[in-house]
Image: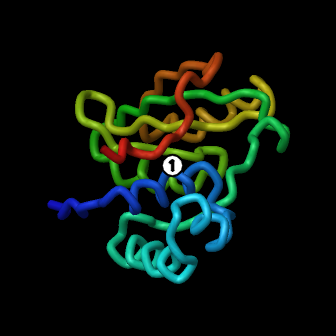
C-alpha cells in the first residue's frame, strides 16, 4: 500500500507546468507561479524525494523513428510457461509497454512495428510459451497522461 502525498495549490501548479514541459527553468516556473526560484527548486526536490515525481525523460516519436504501426498483444501463457513468457516479453525491444493483468490473459503489451511484415516473426517467438491475441492500433485517443491532480 502506498501513502498518498498531500499536494497544495503550488505543488499542483508546478506539476501541471512540468507535465506540459519538463525542461522549464526554475525562473520560468517561479514567474508562472508567483514564487521565488529557490522555492520552486525546493518544492520540485521535495516532490522528487516523496516519489510524486518519478523522473524526467524525453518523449520519442515512434513514427519519426520508422515505426509506422503499433499493436496491442494479449498473452495467455501455456501451462508452466509464465516465467519464460515474462522473460521473453522483457527481452523484445519492440515491446514498449507491458502490463500484468487479471483474467485469462496474463499480460497486455504494446509493440512497435516498422511494417506489418514484422508482426508474424515477432509473435512466432512466443509460440512455445503462450497464445496471443493481437489488435493493430488505428489511432491513440489518449496518450500517456499524468494522473488527475485534484
- Total residue callouts: 1
Please tell me which residue is depicted at 57% across the width and 77% down the height of the picture.
Answer: 37
- Compare residues 21 and 132 and report the one nearer the observer: 21
| Residue 91 spot, x, y in % from top left | 57, 56
In the depicted structure, whether residue 77 falls above or below residue 28: above
In the depicted structure, whether residue 96 falls above or below residue 42: above
Q: How is the image coloured?
A: rainbow
| Residue 147 spot, x, y in % from top left | 39, 44
Report the quarter where the C terminus lies.
Answer: top left
- Is 78 on the left-hand or right-hand side of 48? left
| Residue 148 figure quarter | top left
How many C-alpha atoms fall within 10 Å of the one at disc 1: few (<14), some, or many (≥20)? many
- Compare residues 68 and 58 and report the one nearer the observer: 58
Q: Residue furthest left?
A: 1
In the depicted structure, whether residue 130 falls above or below residue 12: above
| Residue 45 figure quarter | bottom left
| Residue 2 spot, x, y in % from top left | 19, 62
- Is 47 on the left-hand or right-hand side of 118? left
Please tell me which residue is depicted at 47% across the width and 27% down the height of the picture.
Answer: 132
Q: Mark 1 = which residue?
A: 89
Report the quarter where the N terminus lies.
Answer: bottom left
| Residue 75 figure quarter | top left
Please tell me which residue is depicted at 44% across the width and 65% down the height of the picture.
Answer: 53
Label 1: element kind: helix
| Residue 99 spot, x, y in % from top left | 40, 43
- Is 88 on the left-hand or right-hand side of 70? left
Amino acid at each position: 500500500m502506498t501513502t498518498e502525498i498531500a499536494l497544495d495549490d503550488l505543488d499542483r501548479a508546478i506539476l501541471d507546468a512540468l507535465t506540459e514541459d519538463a525542461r522549464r527553468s526554475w525562473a520560468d516556473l517561479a514567474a508562472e507561479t508567483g514564487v521565488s526560484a529557490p522555492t520552486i527548486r525546493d518544492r520540485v526536490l521535495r516532490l522528487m524525494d516523496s516519489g510524486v515525481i518519478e523522473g524526467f525523460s524525453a518523449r520519442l516519436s515512434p513514427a519519426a523513428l520508422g515505426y509506422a504501426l503499433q499493436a496491442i498483444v494479449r498473452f495467455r501463457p501455456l501451462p508452466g510457461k509464465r516465467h519464460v513468457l515474462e522473460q521473453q516479453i522483457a527481452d523484445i525491444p519492440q515491446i514498449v509497454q507491458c502490463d500484468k493483468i487479471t483474467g485469462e490473459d496474463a499480460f497486455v503489451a504494446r509493440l512497435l512495428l516498422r511494417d506489418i511484415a514484422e508482426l508474424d516473426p515477432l509473435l512466432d517467438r512466443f509460440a512455445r510459451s503462450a497464445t496471443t491475441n493481437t489488435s493493430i492500433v488505428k489511432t491513440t485517443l489518449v496518450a500517456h497522461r499524468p494522473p488527475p491532480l485534484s
